[in-house]
Amino acid sequence: ALIHYGIETARRQNLKLCLLDVVITNTRASALYEKFGFRIVETRKFPFNDDAVHVPGQSRMVLKL
C-alpha cells in the first residue's frame, strides 16, 4: 500500500519519474518493485569492502510515470 501511495502521489504532482535505490542483495525487494513497473537502470558497487567496513552495492530503480 505504501508503494502504491507514493506512486499515486508522484503522479498527482505531475512528476515524470520515481527513483529508488535497493541493496543488490535484497532480491525480494527488487522483485516487488519490478511488479510495480520499476526497472533497474544502474548498479553501483562501492570500494569499501574489507574486514572493518562493508558497504553493499546498490541498484538504482526507476519508474516512468
Image (tube, rainbow, N blue to C red):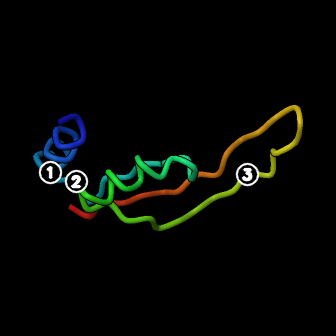
Dot 3 corresponds to which residue? 46
9 to 33, vertically: above or below:
above
Mark 3 residue element: loop
Q: Quadrant of the C terminus?
A: bottom left
Number of the front mark, 3 or 2:
3
Q: Which amino acid does label 2 sit on?
A: Leu
Q: In the image, what residue occupies the spot 58% across and 62% down? A: 43
Amino acid type, mark 1: Arg
Outermost residue, right side: 51
Apparent side of residue 24 relative to residue 35 in the rendered image (left or right): right
Q: Tag 1: Cα neighbours inside 10 Å, few (<14), some, or many (≥20)?
A: some
> Callout 3, which amino acid?
Phe
Of all residues, the one furthest to the left in this rendering is 12
Cα separation, mark 3 vs mark 1, equals 32 Å
Q: Up-down: is 65 above or below 55?
A: below
Residue positioned 22% across, 34% down in the render:
2
| Circle 3 crowding by C-alpha within 10 Å: few under 14, some 14–19, many from 20 | few
Q: In what element is the residue under mark 2?
A: loop
Q: Distance between the residues labelled 1 and 2?
A: 6 Å
Q: How many marks?
A: 3
Q: Position of residue 17 (x, y in %)?
A: 29, 58
Q: Which of marks 3 and 1 is nearer the N terminus?
A: 1
Could you tell me if the residues under marks 1 and 2 are in contact, i.e. CB atoms within 8 Å?
yes
Q: Give x and y (percent) for residue 21.
A: 48, 48
Q: Where does label 1 land, which residue?
A: 11
Q: Which-is-in-front pick, marks 3 and 1?
A: 3
Residue under the point 64% across and 51% down: 57
Dot 2 corresponds to which residue? 15
Quadrant occupied by the N terminus:
top left
First in residue order: circle 3 vs circle 2: 2
Q: Residues within 10 Å of mark 2 (few under 14, many from 20)?
A: few
Q: Position of residue 44 (x, y in %)?
A: 63, 58
